[in-house]
Amino acid sequence: MPKTIFATGINGLVGSHFQNRYNSSYTIVSLDVADPRNPVDITQPEQVLNALSSAKGEYVLHLAAFTNVTEAWKQNGDTHGIAYKVNVEGTKNIIAACQQLGLHLIHVSTAYVFDGENEDLYTEENSVHPIEWYGQTKAEAEALVMASTIDWTVLRIDQPFRSDFFPRLDIAHRILDGLKNNTLYQQFDNHFFGPTYIDDFSKVVDWVLRTGTTGLFNASSGEKWSDFEFATAIANTHSITTEIQKGDLNEYLKTLDRPYQRNTAMDTTKLQNALDFELTPISKAIAEIS
Ligand SMILES: NC(=O)c1ccc[n+]([C@@H]2O[C@H](COP(=O)([O-])OP(=O)(O)OC[C@H]3O[C@@H](n4cnc5c(N)ncnc54)[C@H](OP(=O)(O)O)[C@@H]3O)[C@@H](O)[C@H]2O)c1
């Protein structure tokens, strides 16, 4: 009998890859707010509890979130706003249901819990210090998970991209598209991130489900790339000769009305020491994008 996994946000950019890849290994029960027959809004505690009691499962994979950082900033400080409700109240409801039903929660978080001022990679030992509202709500959510007495695994990711096409373009497909159509905007050489290869991340989730591993893990690639380096690598790997314009983050920040993290790359040594497979180097992952 395949394990039953309850999943929120499974139709999004990250979750739909896991669903496509592992739907024959697990019975995946979706808690989907847009389901016309059985909508489950995670901000409604009774809907969450009803949905999670409906089948015998062991795990909740919690991906649902308000993920639009710019829109979240417009709600800065508003604990009645939708970003706070989904990210914090929604997670609180999931935790309460897991507590009641004895479920292990796999909670997906973000490198935006950090302020981005580190030169080096962020480790699990670094304190969180969010600088904008999306990061603040996600930091509160992961703190609630980690303070709970349920079995939990928190997986932090950054700038995820997948090998296959998804209608909401990820960072790699946006760059590829811009290069092909000669519409690529300037790429900063002084902004850094830690790309997450979603194909690997799905395997990380499967590893948690197979092993029952608990704890906090940075689950990106463990690499640090500037925007310019990343775009150049994509162009070179896909034999595209379009010239890439270098941009300066400091100039961009003068035009931006919200805080922006300069470096969100994370160290993944803890994860890599625990995994029973190797993460794909980003240079190789880029070659797998179609
Ligand atoms: N994408 C990134 O750049 C990024 C980076 C770091 C971390 N993350 C984290 O990774 C996770 C997945 O991100 P993603 O990019 O795959 O997200 P996404 O594509 O924006 O999908 C979000 C999902 O959440 C669901 N959702 C929103 N409000 C809900 C509610 N009230 N009740 C139930 N479901 C609700 C959405 O359902 P509908 O589609 O039906 O509205 C959607 O399926 C999130 O926790 C996010 O914080 C993402």
Image: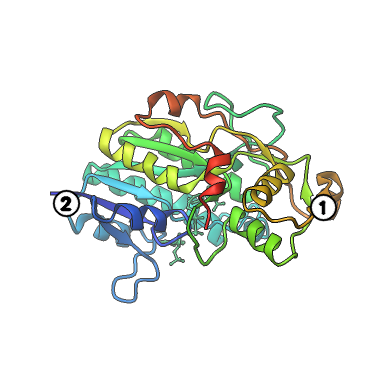
Q: Label 2's element? A: loop
Mark 1 surroundings within 10 Å by alpha-carbon count, few (fewer than 14), some (14 through 19), many (20 or more): few
Residue at 68% of width from left, 64% of height from top? 180
Q: Nearer the viewer, mark 2 or mark 1?
A: 1
Residue at 46% of width from left, 24% of height from top? 270
Q: Label 1's element? A: loop
- Residue 236: % across, % down: 67, 48
Residue carrying label 1? 245
Compared across the picture, whether 123 is left or right of 189 comes to: left
Q: Amino acid at mark 2?
A: Lys
Compared across the picture, whether 138 is left or right of 228 comes to: left
- Residue 136: % across, % down: 59, 45
Q: Are marks 2 and 1 in contact (CB under 8 Å)?
A: no
Q: Of the numbered discs in the image, which one, if any, rests on residue 18? A: none
Q: Is residue 60 above or below residue 219?
A: below
Compared across the picture, whether 171 is left or right of 227 comes to: left
Residue 201 shows in the view = yes
Residue 9 shows in the view = no
- Residue 219: % across, % down: 48, 37
Mark 2 surroundings within 10 Å by alpha-carbon count, few (fewer than 14), some (14 through 19), many (20 or more): few
Sooner in the amino-acid sequence: mark 2 or mark 1: 2
Compared across the picture, whether 105 is left or right of 129 comes to: left
- Residue 182: % across, % down: 75, 64
Q: Of the numbered discs in the image, which one, if any, rests on residue 56? A: 2
